[in-house]
Amino acid sequence: MISATHYLTLAAILFAIGTVGVITRRNVITMFMCVELMLNAVNLTFITFSRFLDQIDGQIFVLFVMTVAAAEAAVGLALIVVLSRHTGTLDVDQANTMKW
Amino acid sequence: MTLIVFYGLAATAVTAAILVVLMSRVVYSALALIVCFGATAGLFFQLGAQFIAAVQVIVYAGAIMVLFLFVIMLLDPASEVFLPSRLKRVPGFALACAVLFTLVLLEAADRWAAAQVFTDSIAGTERSSGPGGEIETLAHSLFRDYLLPFEVTSILILVAVLGAVVLTRQHHETE
């Protein structure tokens, strides 16, 4: 018998791994993929609560999260292409023009 | 049986997620991320969200990751090694992880205390009834209760597509 805690713990682990990726990696594409990983973990939490509270709203939220993630991926990857075109690198430490 | 499937999918997802972080080449990270999304889709299916599982495979593992791979192939990013020493830059990270897992454990303790709310197992309840089942319920909720957010989402996607096109457009005939 699988309880909700199993799924929630798994989602927490995935979210933590994604956070580690965003913090440690400096390649902007990899960081972006780690953000997607974190969104995925949150989706798992939504579905888990939708299941165990017996309400459909969690699945609706997951649909919206996926849509926003798709829009975010389109705009974010366009920004990455522009960044690479302007600076010639994908290292976020090099993109420090607006840094105080 | 369901427990074995759960642990298999969970192990696959966690391993693939760790590989996403550890792989030095970005293409391998992207491929590992596809595996992770696939395993999560299996978990969604196990949780009774068949439509979400299908959308996960089609949109996430399909469309979004193809976009990622196209950009990776377009830009050809250099490989980069994982440096654990960067974790020392952020002392709050350990705190954040601790808080997250404490919340999960608190939830577990709370669940054991009041076991009535969450008691149904995966195979226990069968919510879907009728030919459409789960998806019909989802569609009713989406197109009736959440119609306005749904329409706003379409505008969001339109804006995102326009933004992506405008951002990446090359200015050849300027000046």
Image (cartoon, coloured by chain):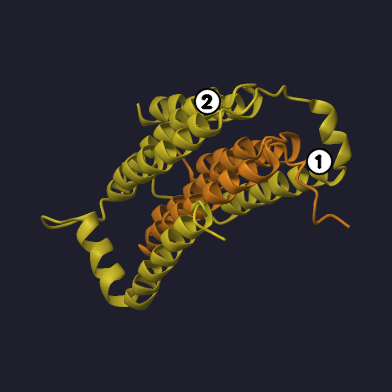
Name the residue beneath numbered marker 1. B94
Quarter of the image where the N terminus of chain B is located? top left
Identify the mark at residue A11; answer none if there is no mark: none
Q: Please state the horizontal and vertical placement of residue B143, each as a whole percent of the image.
A: 26, 72
- Quarter location, residue B56: top left
How much space separates mark 1 and mark 2, taking CA atoms?
Answer: 29 Å
Residue drawn at point x = 59 percent, y = 48 percent:
A82
The amino acid pointed to by label 1 is: Ala
In the rendered structure, the colour chosen for chain A is: orange
Q: Is residue B150 above or below residue A26?
A: below
Q: Is disc 1 surrounded by few (<14), some (14 to 19) or many (20+) residues within 10 Å?
A: some
Quarter of the image where the C terminus of chain B is located? bottom right
Sooner in the amino-acid sequence: mark 1 or mark 2: 2
Is A97 placed left or right of B103 in the picture? right
Q: Nearer the viewer, residue B175 or B24?
A: B175
Q: Is residue B64 above or below residue B149?
A: above
Is A59 placed left or right of A86 in the picture? left
Query: Mark 2: which secondary structure?
Result: helix
Q: Please state the horizontal and vertical placement of residue A9, each as a whole percent of the image.
A: 59, 41
- Quarter location, residue B136: bottom left
Can you name the residue that lies furthest to the front here?
Answer: B175
Name the residue beneath numbered marker 2. B27
Q: Given the image, what chain letter belongs to the residue carrying mark 2? A: B
Q: Are marks 1 and 2 on the same chain?
A: yes
Q: Is residue B124 above or below residue A64?
A: above
Is B120 placed left or right of B170 in the picture? left
Check if mark 1's residue and mark 2's residue have beta carbons within 8 Å.
no
Q: Please state the horizontal and vertical placement of residue B100, each as a whole percent of the image.
A: 70, 48
In the rendered structure, the colour chosen for chain B is: yellow
Residue drawn at point x = 40 percent, y = 63 percent:
B157
